[in-house]
Image (spheres, rainbow, N blue to C red):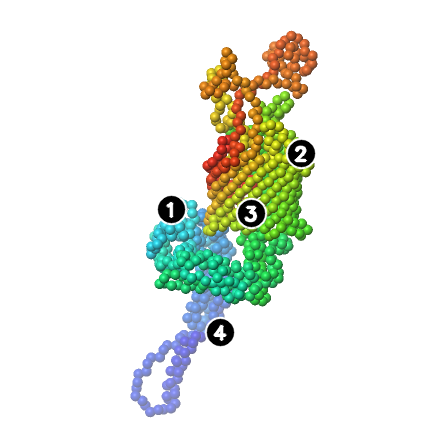
Amino acid sequence: MSARAAAALMTGTILAGLPLAAQAQTPPPAPQVAAPPAAAPLEQRTIKSIRVEGSQRVEPETVLSYTRLRVGQAYTNESVDQAIKDLLASDLLADVSIAGVETGDLVIRIRENPIINRVVLEGNKRLKNDKIEKELKLKPRQIFTRTAVRADVARIIELYRRQGRFAAVVEPKQVSLDQNRVDVIFEIREGPKSKVRQINIIGNEVFDDGELRKQMATKEARLLTILSSNTSYDQDRLAYDQQKLRQFYLTEGYADFRVISAVAELTPDKRDFIITYVVEEGPRYKFGDVTVDSEIRDFNNTTLAASLPMKKDDWYDAKKVEDSVDQLQQAAGLFGYAFSEVEPEFQRDRETLTMGINFRIKEANRTYIEKIDITGNTQTQDKVIRREMRVAEGDAFNTFLVKRSTDRINSLGYFQEKFEIEQKPGSAPDRIVLQANVEEKATGELSLSAGFSSLERFIIQASVRQRNFRGKGQDLRASVNYSTYSKSLELGFTEPYLFDKNIALGGTIFRRDYNNFNYVGQERQTTYSQVSTGFQLATGVPLTEYLTLSGRYSLTQDDVGLDQATFFTNGVCDPVKAGRYLCDAIGNRLTSSLGVSLSYDSLNSRLRPSAGQRVTLGADFAGLGGDVKYIRGNVNAAKYWGIGRGFILSATAEGGYIHSLEKSRGPGIDKVRITDRFYLGEPQFRGFDIRGVGPRVQRISYTGDPSTNDQALITDRNQIVDDALGGRAYYLGKLELELPLGAGARELGLRPSIFIQAGALFGVTRPLPTLAFPQARNADGSLRFNKDGSPTLLPLTTFVKDDQGRQLYVVNNSDSTVAYTTCAVGTSATFGGPCVGSQINSPFTQDTSPFFERFVGDSAKPRLSIGVGVNWNSPFGPLRIDLAKALLSETGDDTKLLTFNVGTQF
């Protein structure tokens, strides 16, 4: 019984007892006064019984548990109404009624909510089913409720709004089935993506709207931004843009800048947003006095203040203030103060418009490393990670060494990117715990791929590699490559820490089959083949943190050959067909060489550096046995700068020189063999074809009829036979700027860049001319000249001999067939036998059409190219595309505008 009903009942009882009391006391009669009407008592009855009707899945006891009605208790109309409300709020029932209220025999009649048979999505194309279904509350075999339907409709609309589709409409429908089951159908009209039509900025005077829009992540929907994902409205991005505006103004000296309001209005058709910012720029400030007040005695305040990036009377820049705080904290960390606190104290002078700053370094305890915890490594052994640490437990804390440890662990390539060593307080104020929470990634690589390359044509590649073999950091690799012009098989193994000492040892065995080539027209022709078989052993020992000394020994058997059917005459290499430079190169040679390198490497990452530098000096000596003797030196250098906002600038340079230790092999023959020289071109020098830079011999044929005196050289570049000779010296430099892209492009592995390159290849002995063609003469014996004044040349006739050096003759048989014999007169029963008969045979000869040979490209003058390129880790292999234009080149250089590689490493 409620308190209100009890009070009313008590009032009625008291009023009812008043007449009886008056009669008992028989007071004197009083004047008759009309009494106020009494309040009618609430009708109260007792529950005699309760019965539940209509329950199928829900037990009657469960139904009663949601009410306060109990047998034997009093009830009112209000308590019955409340019971109905409680049951409907349970989300178990679709309808409830209670009968028998007048008699006390209550009958609760219910109609249960149906069971969901399935949930169907219709009309969704931009959002797939799996993206929506995981967000829905309604599921098959659950109870259907209208509350859940409304919540799911709101949730679907919210998902579409996150996609920028504010015009999305969701209409739920219910299809009744037997056994009290229903299908729930959400009919979705996705609508167009709501774009940002316009961004208005009010209150800006110093910077125009266009400059401020550049600072924002949100972009206006325009033709040039059609591919951008930032043209759709995003509430979170709106808040981010306000912060970006404030950062921009603070870096330009406007310390009082604020965004008064930012409003996004949806157009009536729900297709576009109009965003309006109201800003207040305020005055521009300069830096006042910049001081450092350190409570740590080891610091010299004046020296620290002088090292900061800002100076008095410079325009105020909040970014420089943040950088100064980081710089001072790092400086404190170098002295072992891990938890130093730096607070910039601002002294704003609104009259002089200056901002004085005092950097207060609070007193801190020198910190020592209490413990180094490594977690997350399930495969990689702890020692592999710990040996990259530049600090140890018990050492004084040093921010530089901790950062260096982070870079070295990242450079292993065993863990996910963005790894950082966390710093946590230790058991005492002067103790710190370093925690390396690594997240391992797959280090095994299995590649079976086919592709097409502008360099190699059709490519098949199969390789397997484990860069963290047995979790010990060992590198085990095997690869097979096959293309139209090269084949290779290679097996290798490297142990980076031999016997747990900081000594690397590795070895490789290989067989490489390479075919050199040139072009005649659009046809690629093989010139010489080189088959190399051998092995190499290498070791490396660090001298300091950044300096490493490495050595190597290799033994290689080279077999250089020419196609005999094409380039041989009478069983020997024919210089007329192949050129003297190729005939000099053929043969078998054994090369035994010993090399040493000294490397300085301070890169922050070996995989994708953004800061630091690397310099390597190397020398190789061939002549420890074998057939080849030379000394070769090379240098490689690279430096990287992170210049902000994701831009990475890099400068690389390399060069080399090889000097033969052999005796002269004859006039016009370079002492360094063609297979040992340097070559330059695609892919390392973009803008030029493969081996397209440097010394070469070009063979240019003549066209026309000598009898008409109009014989001339063919000028079509595609019809000139062009053989690269290589060089004994080269240099190559490159300046490249990697451009940042959005998060989506980064996830795809896209890394575009612009670059400029300069280099040259030079320094070989000028080869002797292959031959001199006979000059045509007139009937009177005088020389015949072409119209351009050059002597007219005749074909060169060569007598063909057999493999024993005997002259061959042509026999014309009666059946018009041709036979060859060694008989000048008559024939022989067997080839080379006695000659019988008087028939005179013609000598077997071959004519070589006149050609002109020229030696070009041997110049140290720089070649220059500029271009753009993009790296893409595509689903079918790494892809590199370059569009480069050669700005400077020398006669004979082969330029190339577009190059690409796919299906193989670049």
Q: Which residue is mark 4?
A: 72
**Counting residues from the N terminus, which is met first, the one under dot 3 or under dot 2?**
3
Task: Name the residue nearer the viewer: 37 or 788.
Answer: 788
> Residue at label 1?
222
The earlier-in-sequence mark between 2 and 4 is 4
Local SS, label 3: strand
Quadrant into which the N terminus falls: bottom left
Q: Nearer the viewer, mark 3 or mark 4?
A: 3
Distance from label 2 to label 4 (Cα)?
116 Å
Whichever of callouts 1 and 2 sits on the residue coming sooner in the sequence is 1
Q: CA distance from mark 4 to mark 1?
A: 76 Å
Q: Is residue 265 visible?
A: no
Q: Name the N-terminal-most of marks 3 and 4.
A: 4
Foreground pick, 63 / 711: 711
Horizontal and vertical percent position of residue 206: 35, 54
Mark 4, residues whose alpha carbon is within 10 Å: few (<14), some, or many (≥20)?
few
Q: Quadrant of residue 241?
A: bottom left
Instruction: Establish if 732 lies above or below 250.
Output: above
Which residue is at 60% across, 40% downward?
633
* Residue 788 visible (yes or no): yes
| Kind of residue sitting beneath label 2 | Asp
Tell me the residue that label 3 is attached to: 614
Q: What residue is shown at x 65% (from left), y 10% (from top)?
A: 826
Q: Residues within 10 Å of mark 3 (few under 14, many from 20)?
A: some
* Amino acid type indicated by mark 1: Arg
